[in-house]
Amino acid sequence: MTTKAHPEFCYAILPGRKRAVILIKRGEEGYWPEHGMTVEEAERRNGLFNVTPAMRTAMQVGSMFGWHLPGADPERAEELYSNAKPLSVEG
């Protein structure tokens, strides 16, 4: 279940594709490719909206496996994903 605690959207890296930026929307299944966006720009935009690496990871879990799962809970994100890395060091 999504809440207002989830950001409206965030940017992430497509798993298995080092530099492929995707957009994840709160409560939506799947993702939207962001062709031409750099990882650095995605990271900058996440920062503008105060999306932490842990929150981004929770959004990825929700979009891939279901928003009802504990791993998608934004209030547990920092606890669960405290070792999440910025986009620029992933991959």
Image (cartoon, rainbow, N blue to C red):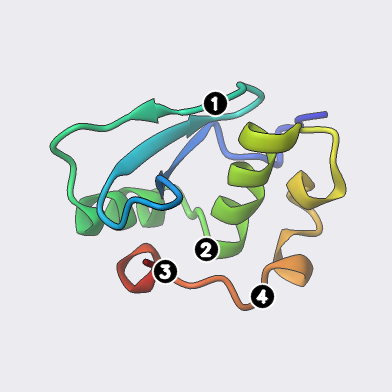
Left or right, 53 with respect to 58, comes to left
The residue tagged 4 is 82
SS assignment at label 2: helix
How far separated are the C-alphas under marks 2 and 3?
6 Å
**Label 3 near label 2: C-beta < 8 Å?**
yes
Q: Nearer the viewer, mark 3 or mark 1?
A: 1
Question: What residue do we see at 66% from left, 75% from top?
Answer: 82
Q: Point out the tag, 4 or 2, that comes first from the N-terminus.
A: 2
The residue tagged 2 is 53
Residue furthest bottom in the image: 83
SS assignment at label 3: loop
Q: Is residue 59 above or below residue 71?
A: above
How crowded is the residue under tag 3: few (<14 C-alpha within 10 Å), some, or many (20+)?
Answer: some
Residue furthest left in the image: 36
How far separated are the C-alphas under marks 2 and 1?
18 Å
Looking at this view, is 26 or 12 the one in front? 12
Looking at this view, is 56 or 15 the one in front? 15
The residue tagged 3 is 86
